[in-house]
C-alpha cells in the first residue's frame, strides 16, 4: 500500500496548522511550523485567498493527514458515514476517532497517531484478548484495547504507561494505566473530539 514517506512536518506547513504528527517535538520550539509558518517549496509564496473549492479540499486533506488515512480509504469511510444515521460530518469524525491507531494515541501509549499505527502494525495490541494488527480496525462500545502480555515488559511501553497517568484521556475511554489497557465506554461525542476540523467543509467537498 502506498504511504507518505517524506518529512511529515511539510504537511503541517502546507496546511498552515500543527497536525501533531511528530509527537513530543510538536510541543517544542523545534517544531518547523513555529519557525517557518509558510508552505514548503523553493520559495516562500504569499498565501492567496482560497476559492470555495480550495477551502473544501484543504479541509479534506487536513482530515486525511491528521488521521493518516489514504485517499481511497478516506472516501470509503465517508461513504459509510453518509449511509449511517446521524449528521454525516459528526459520524465521520466518530469513525476516525474509533480507529485502533487513534485509540492507542488517545490512551497515551503512543505519542502520535503515526507511532500508534506502527505499534499496531507490529502486533503489540489486542482487542478483547485477540491480537489485532490492523490500524483501521474500528473499536466498538465495550471493547477492551490492551498492550499484549508479551510487549508489556518492553521499556518503551513501561515508560509510556507512566506518561499515560498524567496525560488527559477522553471521557469515552476508561484507562487503566497499570494494566496498559482501556475500555471503550461509548461513542465519542462531537464536543469531545478536540481535532481542529470543520467537518462540514469535508461533507461539502464530497457533495459538490
Image (spheres, rainbow, N blue to C red):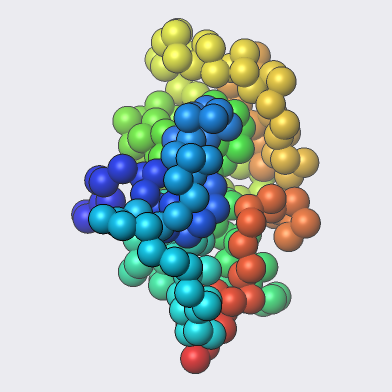
**Between 83 and 194, the one nearer to me in the picture:** 194
**Between 112 and 30, the one nearer to me in the picture:** 30
Number of marks drawn: 0
Left or right, 171 with respect to 23, comes to: right
Give the residue displayed 52% in from the left and 78% down from the top. Answer: 49
Give the residue displayed 44% in from the left and 39% down from the top. Answer: 32
Give the residue displayed 50% in from the left and 84% down from the top. Answer: 51
Q: Name the quadrant of the N terminus.
A: bottom left
Q: Quadrant of residue 191?
A: bottom right
When the figure is inspected, residue 8 is found, relative to residue 204, above or below; the finding is above
When the figure is inspected, residue 41 is found, relative to residue 202, above or below; the finding is above
Q: Position of residue 40 (x, y in %)?
A: 35, 54
Q: Position of residue 208 (x, y in %)?
A: 49, 91
Q: Which residue is outermost to the left?
A: 1
Q: Position of residue 62 (x, y in %)?
A: 49, 61
Q: Position of residue 177 (x, y in %)?
A: 65, 19
When the figure is inspected, residue 170 is found, relative to residue 205, above or below; the finding is above
Left or right, 51 with respect to 72, comes to: right
**Residue 174 seen from this side:** yes
Give the residue displayed 44% in from the left and 66% down from the top. Answer: 46
**Residue 79 seen from this side:** no
Amino acid at each position: 500500500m502506498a504511504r507518505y514517506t517524506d518529512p511529515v512536518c511539510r504537511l503541517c506547513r502546507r496546511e498552515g496548522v500543527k497536525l501533531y504528527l511528530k509527537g513530543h517535538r510538536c510541543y517544542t520550539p523545534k517544531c518547523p511550523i513555529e519557525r517557518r509558518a509558510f508552505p514548503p517549496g523553493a520559495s516562500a509564496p504569499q498565501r492567496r485567498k482560497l476559492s470555495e473549492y480550495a477551502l473544501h479540499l484543504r479541509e479534506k486533506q487536513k482530515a486525511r493527514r491528521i488521521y493518516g488515512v489514504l485517499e481511497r480509504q478516506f472516501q470509503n469511510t465517508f461513504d459509510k458515514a453518509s449511509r449511517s444515521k446521524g449528521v454525516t460530518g459528526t459520524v465521520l469524525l466518530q469513525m476516525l476517532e474509533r480507529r485502533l491507531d487513534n485509540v492507542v494515541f488517545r490512551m497515551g501509549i503512543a505519542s502520535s497517531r503515526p507511532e500508534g499505527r506502527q505499534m499496531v502494525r507490529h502486533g503489540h495490541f489486542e482487542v478483547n484478548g485477540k491480537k489485532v494488527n490492523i490500524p483501521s480496525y474500528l473499536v466498538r462500545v465495550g471493547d477492551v484495547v490492551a498492550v499484549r502480555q508479551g510487549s508489556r515488559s518492553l521499556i518503551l511501553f513501561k515508560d509510556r504507561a507512566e506518561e499515560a497517568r498524567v496525560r488527559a484521556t477522553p471521557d469515552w475511554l476508561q484507562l487503566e494505566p497499570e494494566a496498559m489497557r482501556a475500555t471503550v465506554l461509548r461513542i465519542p461525542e462531537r464536543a469531545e473530539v478536540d481535532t481542529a476540523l470543520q467537518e462540514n467543509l469535508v461533507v461539502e467537498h464530497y457533495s459538490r
